[in-house]
Image (tube, rainbow, N blue to C red):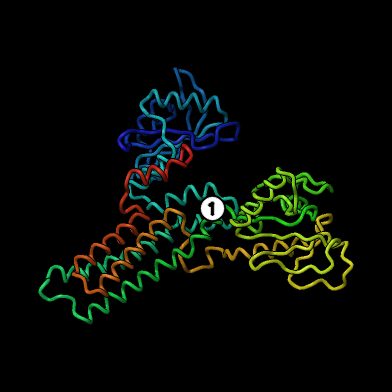
């Protein structure tokens, strides 16, 4: 990888206004010039210049295109890049790609353009991950978080942490270089304070892991309650269309139904579950087992009550939102506190319910926060290992171990932190990250 020229369709396959094919590599311009026919060849085009012409395959013009040349190192990948934009349509795009491959390019692998950008120092690994997060974002909050990470906010926080770890290690290694002096009490206190500061910084970043998971995967919102209280009706109301079958017969929903939706820019995975009651029906019992399983993993649970069937409703367990559905049937006077009244028939109370759900996520727009962008599972693993190493270094200092033993732990912490931005770019780590990218990006 890196020495050859790659090509791929950078827009989705199928019918559209424009299809854009991207090439990257040392021979990108010369390969494109074998097909491009304009007033002037692309070889002499300055970076960023757009030229109009036709693309010829097997001696015939197949499309009228615009070709843009981006010269290394001022391109997305850091290599020479050519982007050929033609009319949308699968047949023409496939024909141009085949001709480019015959002219010396090869098909790009998933994420290979972004991987080359990382290898060529155009972005760190957190920014490369943010490219995919931005593409996959299902809500404004997710897109904002990805954009902040792409802009380098998380990378800057990690590099700051890495610099502080390196400073502590350098301080310690000074004593290794001059062993006759040892670590005096004052220097020991300074090193312990630095270890505590490192742990605090790591813990702050680890504290954003749940938020990162919810932004990337969606907040797990589980709807539960007794049979026939309106759980499926609530699912349909939140989605805005009839997804679940609604019936007056108890036990209609026997399996969980999961759908994605966005509320106030925040992505959710909303799960409608089987009603909880005593039953001898093995299928219904299995549905209820799955209900309890989803409740154990829920970020937010909605407990639904029937206003026409409960005389004295009360709020649910701590951490869940209790919805009093069919509030049009309520005859009990003032509603008890702690409930969210709702009527699925006319959507009465829906806005207040959405306010309660969104408020329970505690997800703030990234632009309003000073701390780093919410981390993902890979970052979490690296930081956890770094924190364990810092704790081991601190314990070594307190025991009065030789500086060499403490230094080993700090080096492990430094390596773990460096993995986040790609300081130690093992092929298996890179492969795992870029494997999920789309081809052409």
The image quadrant where one finds the N terminus is top left
Question: How many residues crowd mark 1 within 10 Å: few (<14), some (14–19), many (20+)?
Answer: many
Q: Compared with residue 77, is residue 329 higher up or lower down, i.e. above or below? A: below
Name which quarter of the figure residue 82 lies in: top left
Of the pair 258 and 35, the residue shown nearer to us: 258
Residue at 53 percent across and 34 percent down: it is 19
Q: Compared with residue 41, is residue 218 higher up or lower down, i.e. above or below? A: below
Q: Is residue 247 left or right of residue 124?
A: right
Give how far across and how far down residue 313 sits, in percent.
79, 67
Q: Compared with residue 93, is residue 48 higher up or lower down, i.e. above or below? A: below
Of the pair 93 and 202, the residue shown nearer to us: 202
* Count of number-bearing discs: 1
Give how far across and how far down residue 232 sits, in percent.
75, 50
Q: Is residue 377 left or right of residue 220?
A: left
Name which quarter of the figure residue 188 lies in: bottom left
Give how far across and how far down residue 325 sits, in percent.
80, 60
Residue 127 shows up from this direction? yes
The residue wearing badge 1 is 216
Name which quarter of the figure residue 229 lies in: bottom right
């Amino acid at each position: 990888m890196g020495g050859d020229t790659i090509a791929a369709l950078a827009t989705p396959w199928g019918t559209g206004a424009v299809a854009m094919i991207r090439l990257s590599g040392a021979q990108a311009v010369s390969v494109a010039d074998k097909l491009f026919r304009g007033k002037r060849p692309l070889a002499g085009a300055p970076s960023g210049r757009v030229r109009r012409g036709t693309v010829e395959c097997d001696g015939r013009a197949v499309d009228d295109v615009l070709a843009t040349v981006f010269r290394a190192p001022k391109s997305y990948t850091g290599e020479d890049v050519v982007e050929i934009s033609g009319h949308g349509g699968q047949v023409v795009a496939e024909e141009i790609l085949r001709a480019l491959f015959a002219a010396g390019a090869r098909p790009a692998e998933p994420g290979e353009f972004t991987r080359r950008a990382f290898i060529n120092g155009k972005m760190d690994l957190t920014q490369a991950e943010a490219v995919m997060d931005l593409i996959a974002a299902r809500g404004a909050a997710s897109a904002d978080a990805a954009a902040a990470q792409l802009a380098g906010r998380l990378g800057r926080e990690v590099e700051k942490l890495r610099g502080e770890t390196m400073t502590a290690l350098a301080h310690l290694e000074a004593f290794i270089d001059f062993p006759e002096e040892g670590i005096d009490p004052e220097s020991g206190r300074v090193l312990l304070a630095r270890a505590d500061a490192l742990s605090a910084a790591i813990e702050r970043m680890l504290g954003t892991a749940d938020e990162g998971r919810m932004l990337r995967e969606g907040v797990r919102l589980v709807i539960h309650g007794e049979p026939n209280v309106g759980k499926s009706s609530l699912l349909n109301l939140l989605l805005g269309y009839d997804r679940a079958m609604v019936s007056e017969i108890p036990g209609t929903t026997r399996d969980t139904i999961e759908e994605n939706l966005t509320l106030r820019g925040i992505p959710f995975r909303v799960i409608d579950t089987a009603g909880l009651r005593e039953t001898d029906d093995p299928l219904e019992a299995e549905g209820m087992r799955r209900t309890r399983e989803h409740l154990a993993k829920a970020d937010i649970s909605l407990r639904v009550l029937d206003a026409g069937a409960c005389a004295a409703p009360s709020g649910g367990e701590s951490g869940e939102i209790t919805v009093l559905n069919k509030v049009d049937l309520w005859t009990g006077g003032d509603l008890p506190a702690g409930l969210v009244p709702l009527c699925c028939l006319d959507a009465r109370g829906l806005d207040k319910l959405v306010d309660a759900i969104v408020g329970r996520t505690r997800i703030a727009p990234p632009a309003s926060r000073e701390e780093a962008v919410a981390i993902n599972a890979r970052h979490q693993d690296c930081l956890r290992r770094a924190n364990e190493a810092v704790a081991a270094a601190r314990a070594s200092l307190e025991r009065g171990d030789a500086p060499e033993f403490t230094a080993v732990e700090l080096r492990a912490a430094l390596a773990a932190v460096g993995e986040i931005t790609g300081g130690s770019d093992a092929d298996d780590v890179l492969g795992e990250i870029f494997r999920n990218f789309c081809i052409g990006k």
